[in-house]
Image (cartoon, rainbow, N blue to C red):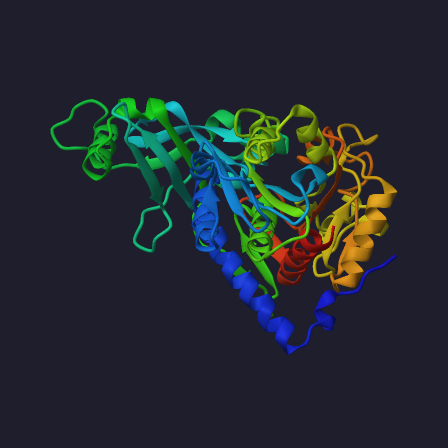
């Protein structure tokens, strides 16, 4: 069933709201290029809307009541927001879950070296990338350096107009005959994704004078030593702000839209909720791009431990009530889908593809080939969601990731489904997924925001 472009359905007031949402979203993309930056901004916005940190709520020890707003942060890389509804928590929640990590390059723990008068940072790429896409493009460095005295220095270089940027170099075409014969996966090797950061030698230094110059700059600006790299988390990402794309300015091109397009719209929908009948939750997590592992990924117990704390505040916690709360919940796994690209039509089955400008995308299952590793949402849940979308005038489409045997991918959906709750993937169609610069339609961003608001209210 073909869906039409949603642009034709908007009147003047809708277009004004659409542009407002997208302008705010572009600022979020530009200012929040790491999971830490996303959490920091989410907390700032949540506090403006009256949310209190869980630790403060626990200290007071008062029972929760309808309308209470709480947030919990996990290691500065994941955050969960809750608004208590009229119904008991045991009856379940309406949950929006997105991830805030994106493919990138990470500095290794002993990264700084000099070779033939050039200083580099040695890196290890993170997530699924086409390595050749990351060379010869301006890069920025974001992250933290933790010192032994307990201080944490925040780093963000390459975003301001007067900031320097950084780069991974490539071989000139005149000498690249052997390189051009390689498979795309081998054109640039992972160990060659080293970032060029300097060329000016420090005076009165004989050995590694350029490296010494870089260390001198770091000492003066941040008061850090080379040894402090051992406890640093530095992420190398594309430099530059999100931009409008096309003569008609109908699209957005930016780094990190997988999955910050769903994270931002979920967060905004959550912050605009007031007095829900059923408790609402927005969950923004780390590590999805590498399997949702680790203490800040969805496979950790951060989420269910936090829900247990909320139940305990009313003095009636037990394991069975926690299990009932999770089982009775409904969730949208807010994540992107592959947008149909006519230039690569062979990768898609057109009848089951998602298209830019045709609304938010529901993906009944992800996984690979024979649905391996997928969460497969049940038909009854899909029917209920269709009604919610239609009742709230949300434009949507249903799609798969691509042709059955072309590959595949996954989200956090299958992890939440293990609790027995109803879960489905729901997000925005994306061009250039996992590339340094990804593309969305402003209309789809707006419809996702409307979808997430409708879900929290009516699911």
Q: Can residue 128 be seen in this view?
A: no
Q: Hey, which residue is sitting farthest bottom in the picture?
A: 12
Query: Which of the pair 228/275 is nearer the observer?
Result: 275
Front position in the image: 3 or 268: 268
* Nearest to the observer: residue 434 or residue 261: 261
At 78% from the left edge and 62% from the top edge, which residue is drawn?
391
Residue 11 drawn at (x, y percent):
68, 76
Image-based side of 329 in relation to 36, left or right: right
Q: List x then y, in percent, for residue 350.
A: 83, 51
Tell me which corner region of the image, top left, top right, bottom left or bottom right, holds residue 208.
top left
Q: Quadrant of residue 146?
A: top left
Q: In this view, does 430 lie above or below 250?
A: above
Is 253 situated left or right of 340 in this image? left
Q: Nearer the viewer, residue 184 or 265?
A: 265
- From the viewer's perspective, is residue 408 above or below residue 70? above
Q: Position of residue 376 (x, y in %)?
A: 81, 36
Instruction: Give the total number of marks visible in the rendering.
Output: 0
Can residue 439 be seen at all in this image of the molecule?
Answer: yes
Query: Quick check: 302 left or right of 327?
Result: left
Position in image of residue 245 (x %, y %)? 57, 62
Residue at screen point 58% across, 26% down: 300
Q: Using the rendered view, name the quadrant where residue 8 is placed.
A: bottom right
Quadrant containing the N terminus in the rendered view: bottom right
Left or right position of 195 against 29: left
């Amino acid at each position: 069933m073909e869906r039409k472009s949603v642009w034709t359905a908007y009147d003047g007031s809708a277009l004004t709201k659409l542009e407002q949402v997208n302008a705010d979203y572009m600022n979020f993309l530009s200012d929040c290029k790491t999971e830490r930056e996303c959490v920091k901004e989410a907390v700032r916005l949540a506090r403006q809307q009256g949310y209190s940190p869980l630790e403060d709520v626990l200290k007071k020890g008062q029972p929760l009541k309808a309308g209470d707003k709480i947030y919990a942060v996990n290691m500065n890389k994941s955050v969960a927001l809750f608004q208590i509804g009229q119904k008991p928590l045991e009856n379940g929640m309406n949950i929006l879950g997105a991830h805030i990590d994106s493919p990138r390059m990470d500095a290794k723990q002993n990264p700084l070296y000099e070779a033939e008068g050039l200083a580099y940072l040695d890196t290890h790429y993170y997530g699924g990338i086409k390595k050749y896409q990351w060379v010869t493009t301006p890069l920025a460095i974001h992250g933290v350096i933790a010192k032994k005295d307990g201080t944490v220095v925040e780093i963000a270089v390459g975003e301001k107009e007067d900031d320097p940027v950084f780069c991974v170099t490539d071989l000139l075409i005149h000498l690249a005959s052997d390189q051009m014969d390689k498979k795309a996966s081998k054109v640039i090797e992972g160990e060659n994704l080293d970032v060029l950061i300097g060329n000016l030698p420090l005076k009165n230094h004989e050995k590694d004078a350029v490296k010494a110059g870089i260390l001198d700059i770091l000492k003066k600006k941040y008061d850090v030593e080379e040894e402090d790299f051992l406890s640093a988390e530095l992420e190398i990402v594309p430099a530059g702000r999100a931009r409008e794309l096309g003569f008609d300015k109908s699209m957005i091109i930016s780094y990190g839209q997988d999955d910050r397009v769903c994270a931002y719209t979920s967060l905004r929908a959550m912050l605009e909720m007031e007095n829900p009948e059923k408790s609402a939750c927005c969950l923004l997590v780390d590590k999805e791009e590498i399997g949702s592992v680790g203490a800040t990924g969805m496979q950790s117990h951060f989420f269910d431990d936090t829900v247990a704390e909320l139940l305990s505040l009313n003095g009636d916690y037990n394991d069975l009530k926690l299990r009932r709360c999770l089982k009775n919940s409904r969730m949208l796994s807010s994540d992107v889908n592959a947008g149909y690209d006519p230039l690569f039509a062979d990768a898609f089955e057109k009848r089951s593809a998602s298209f830019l400008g045709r609304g938010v995308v529901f993906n009944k299952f992800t996984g690979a080939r024979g649905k391996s590793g997928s969460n497969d949402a049940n038909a009854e849940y899909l029917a209920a969601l269709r009604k919610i979308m239609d009742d709230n005038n949300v434009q949507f489409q249903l799609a798969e990731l691509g042709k059955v045997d072309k590959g595949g991918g996954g989200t956090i959906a299958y992890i939440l489904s293990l609790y027995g709750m109803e879960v489905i993937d729901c997000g925005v169609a994306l061009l250039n997924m996992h590339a340094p610069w990804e593309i969305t339609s402003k209309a789809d961003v707006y419809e996702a925001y409307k979808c997430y608001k409708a879900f929290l209210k009516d699911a």
